[in-house]
Image (cartoon, rainbow, N blue to C red):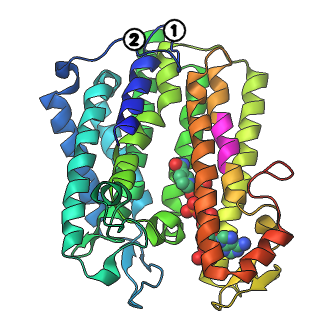
Amino acid sequence: MLLLPATMFHLLLVARSGPARLLGPPPYLPEPKALWSPRALLLWLTWLGLQVALYLLPARKVAEGQELKDKSRLCYPINGFQALVLTALLVGLGVSAGLPLGALPEMLLPLAFMATLTAFIFSLLLYLKALIAPASALAPGGNSGNPIYDFFLGRELNPRICSFDFKYFCELRPGLIGWVLINLALLLQEAELRGSPSLAMCLVNGFQLLYVGDALWHEEAVLTTMDITHDGFGFMLAFGDLAWVPFTYSLQAQFLLYHPQPLELPMASVICLINAVGYYIFRGANSQKNSFRKNPSDPKVAGLETISTATGRQLLVSGWWGMVRHPNYLGDLIMALAWSLPCGMSHLLPYFYLIYFTALLVHREARDEQQCLQKYGLAWQEYCRRVPYRIMPYIY
Ligand code: NDP
């Protein structure tokens, strides 16, 4: 809980320093007045308020989540993409009316501080709220009795006030949309400084916008992910969603603003191809599982080979899920590589995301395997025998 915010501030400070050394000490330690700014607080609260308001707008669809312990299902508004588009329109209007979006990069430090503070306070409130939640509302993890561990992991699975679902709201909106907004601000500031945005900055912005737009377009798919179905809502997800994602995932664009990198068209084309391959695998795998879980007799997936399990659910054993046991992670990692390559090879810093994300997905994969083994027993063992590689064919 201390190391994650410290790492995030380290990255923010190092990205703007001349040597930009990931493994070196931070160039300086910020004074309290560099972190605390009433302007940043106001901006942060306005941002959260705007995203809450957009969440509450009528949705094109209301989807049901997975069945809960008490056999009920929760309803979720599917309007994340609409929130992205409306945010883009509002920001566009603001910029044309003189909103200095290019000044945002100068406020990243205090904004990250506000987000961190919010994550701590919010997690504490969530922890207290879980004390009065019924046992059926608690997550499988995060209820060990050790308050620090439970505060970190999150006690309640789906904390809500009326129909407002805190975890679902935080998962894809303030952080993900904030990430692409920070990227855009960095691009605008680069254009102001150097006359036009660099090709490298355009690629990073384009790739990451595609990723965020895709996540919000397929928002319903988040309802079958581990974060929603298994993990409680505590510091891990609150800090991850609100602070870590917008302020560290924009690291490549931050790096490029302070360390411009030449990028020739042929190399840019190769990087685009790598991103396209990653996206193709990532989207293909996620959509295939999602269609299969929603309706196994959907013509798109009905021809795939499956293994039956004692729970009545089936496991895919051909198609993307017959290649490795987590093809979606493979695609995600290939895209992560494509996001770092425009930053050149002179620094390790822009590759932080790739390194961190590999560690995250390897750990996440191990957690998922454990849960699937518990859930499906022998059928999972049979799946592992037939599909021996976890993420990377013939390597891992
Ligand atoms: P997955 O979407 O991979 O879901 C795992 C679940 O899928 C398993 O628990 C199991 O659940 C089901 N499953 C596993 N194997 C099979 C199979 N052969 N056939 C059918 N169902 C199967 O997990 P995540 O939630 O971790 O990831 C979702 C996406 O989000 C991924 O693309 C990941 O890369 C991305 N992600 C991105 C992050 C980021 O920071 N950028 C962070 C974390 C994830 P069940 O059987 O119960 O359906």
- Would you name the residue on which mark 2 appears? 27
Residue sitting at 53 percent across and 66 percent down?
Answer: 225
Which quarter of the rendering shows the N terminus?
Answer: top left
Q: Quadrant of residue 268?
A: top right
Specify whether 361 is left or right of 390. Answer: left
Q: Residues within 10 Å of mark 1 (few under 14, many from 20)?
A: few
Disc 1 marks which amino acid?
Answer: Pro
- Residue 1 seen from this side: yes
Question: What segment carries the magenta color?
Answer: 332-338
Q: Which mark is residue 19?
A: 1
> What main secondary structure does the magenta stretch of the protein show?
helix
Residue sitting at 66 percent across and 19 percent down?
Answer: 344
Secondary structure beneath disc 1?
loop
Residue 269 position, x and y percent, is 76, 30
Disc 2 marks which amino acid?
Answer: Pro
- Residue 300 seen from this side: no
Q: In the image, is residue 98 above or below residue 347?
A: below
Residue sitting at 57 percent across and 26 percent down?
Answer: 350
Residue 362 position, x and y percent, is 64, 51
Q: Would you say residue 379 sits in the magenta stretch?
A: no
- Viewer-side residue, 142 vs 284: 142
Residue 218 position, x and y percent, is 54, 63
Q: Residue furthest left?
A: 38
Q: Is mark 1 within 8 Å of ligand 1?
A: no
Q: Are marks 2 and 1 in contact (CB under 8 Å)?
A: yes
Residue 200 position, x and y percent, is 61, 23
Secondary structure beneath disc 2?
loop
Q: Quadrant of residue 114?
A: top left
